[in-house]
Image: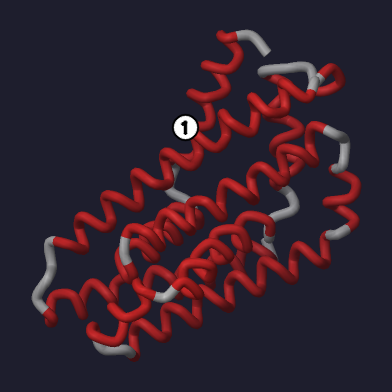
């Protein structure tokens, strides 16, 4: 890959990652409800899912992704159910009890998995990358070094944008320290999570 193609790919990925989407809503809702670390962990999960599909696209494994359609669909439903469950938990919980979640390592892993599941739940993403990446490099001539560059570019571009969303959401959350206002923020985050989960289910039938 040339420097110009890497820069072009980076720019395109930044724009695509910044567009409103289910992944953006998930990062924002996790950051609002439980703090920046949770939003960042969700962003990492999303990046890992994208990297998986990029590797599938590069090495001609799209047939495997399509053949595993039922598995990916199951993951998509699992991710949707998890987000809806989190949203319902926020709607029912008091602010003080929600704050406890920010200190548990298990919930950090759960945030990472929520990002990963909503990404790998869409096996059509590998087809998108198969159509998207050839604009920047010849997939039949990709070297190990090129693969590393692609993964690094994806990590910085997609991960960077999602973490910016997480930071902005966390700062918005930090403005509302009083219990009543924080409870309202939790309700908003819960509603976003439920809406995102429902959107994933609807998208699965689209």
Q: Nearer the viewer, residue 178 or 118?
A: 178
64 with respect to 95 (left or right): right
Please rate how many residues cluster around mark 1, counting C-alpha atoms within 10 Å: few if below 14, some from 14 to 19, many from 20: many
Q: Residue at x 76, y 33 (%)?
A: 130
Q: Quadrant of the N terminus?
A: top right
Secondary structure under the numbered disc 1 in the rendered image: helix
Residue 94 figure quarter: bottom left
173 with respect to 83 (left or right): left
Q: Residue at x 47, y 32 (%)?
A: 14
Measured along the vertical axis of the image, is residue 21 above or below residue 56? below
Residue 6 figure quarter: top right
70 with respect to 16 (left or right): right
Residue 26 x, y percent position in the rendering: 45, 61
Residue 47 x, y percent position in the rendering: 57, 46
Q: Which residue is mark 1?
A: 14
Measured along the vertical axis of the image, is residue 10 above or below residue 20? above
Q: Nearer the viewer, residue 191 or 136?
A: 136
Q: Residue at x 72, y 44 (%)?
A: 53
Measured along the vertical axis of the image, is residue 56 above or below residue 187? above
Q: Nearer the viewer, residue 127 or 51?
A: 51
Measured along the vertical axis of the image, is residue 98 above or below residue 193? below
Q: Quadrant of the C terminus?
A: bottom right
Residue 182 x, y percent position in the rendering: 18, 75
């Amino acid at each position: 890959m040339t420097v110009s193609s890497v820069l072009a790919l980076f720019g395109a990925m930044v724009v695509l990652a910044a567009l409103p989407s289910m992944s953006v809503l998930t990062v924002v809702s996790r950051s609002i409800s439980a703090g920046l670390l949770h939003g960042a962990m969700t962003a990492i999960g999303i990046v890992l899912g994208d990297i998986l599909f990029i590797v599938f696209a590069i090495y001609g494994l799209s047939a495997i992704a399509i053949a595993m359609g039922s598995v990916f669909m199951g993951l998509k439903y699992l991710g949707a159910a998890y987000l809806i469950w989190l949203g319902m938990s926020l709607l029912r919980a008091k602010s003080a009890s929600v704050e406890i979640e920010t200190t548990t390592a298990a919930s950090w892993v759960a945030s990472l998995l929520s990002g990963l599941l909503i990404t790998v739940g869409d096996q059509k993403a590998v087809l998108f990358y198969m159509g998207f990446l050839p604009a920047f490099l010849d997939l039949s001539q990709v070297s190990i070094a090129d693969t590393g560059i692609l993964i690094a570019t994806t990590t910085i571009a997609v991960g960077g944008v999602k973490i910016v969303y997480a930071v902005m959401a966390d700062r918005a959350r930090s403005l509302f320290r009083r219990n009543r206002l924080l409870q309202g923020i939790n309700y908003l985050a819960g509603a976003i999570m439920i809406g995102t989960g429902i959107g994933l289910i609807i998208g699965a039938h689209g």
